[in-house]
Amino acid sequence: MSKKVCTLCDSREESDEMLPLISDSLFFGPSIDENILYLISFLPSSWLEKIGFLHERKQKESDYEKENIKEMDLSKWLRNEYVGLAKEVEDRGCCLSEFSDRVDTPMLESRKFVLNRLAELMEKKSEIEKSWLSQRKRCD
């Protein structure tokens, strides 16, 4: 048995079951502010942009879709990930001496492991591409 706090009277009691949280919406339905939000969600997105609810969300989504439509350049993506992770590990490593209490050393070690593994994958990818090109030249 554990001591739990009663949600209604804030007294501690010993019980095995927890009292459920009860809201007014359970008995009386949604409140006025919830109804207003539901009604606003039915407005067209062009109106919501004009009154400032969307904050140019549509533009950001279209930029994201354009990036996905472009042909995926695996080597560029892999290099960007490698460089970003290397910078992060370097920044964390430099801060290790100054702020040793803030840096999570297991996290730093895991990132170094991922960085090494990513470098191995890049090397393996280049080896596979070279072997594929050499086989293709032989066939031609």
Image (cartoon, helix red, strand yellow):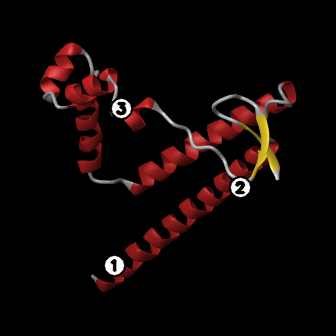
Q: Give the mark nearest the N terminus, 1 or 3.
A: 3
Residue at the disc numbered 3: 28
Give the amino acid at mark 1.
Answer: Arg
In the image, which is nearer the foreground, mark 2 or mark 1?
2
Residue type indicated by callout 3: Phe
Picture residue at 50% right of the left edge, 66% below the top: 125
Q: Are marks 1 and 3 in contact (CB under 8 Å)?
A: no
Residue visible at 86% across and 29% down? Answer: 97
Pick whichever, 93 or 6, lies toward us: 6
Which amino acid does the dot numbered 2 rest on? Answer: Phe
Q: Residues within 10 Å of mark 1 (few under 14, many from 20)?
A: few
Disc 1 versus disc 3: distance between alpha carbons?
A: 72 Å
Q: Residue at x 60, y 57 (%)?
A: 118
Label 3 to label 2, Cα distance in Å?
Answer: 55 Å
Q: CA distance from mark 2 to mark 1?
A: 34 Å
Asked if the residue at tag 2 contacts the one at tag 3, i.e. Cβ–Cβ closer than 8 Å, the answer is: no
Q: Position of residue 60 (x, y in %)?
A: 29, 31
Neighbourhood count class around disc 2 (C-alpha, 10 Å): few under 14, some 14–19, many 20 upward: few
Which residue reaches farthest bottom? 139
The residue under label 1 is: 136
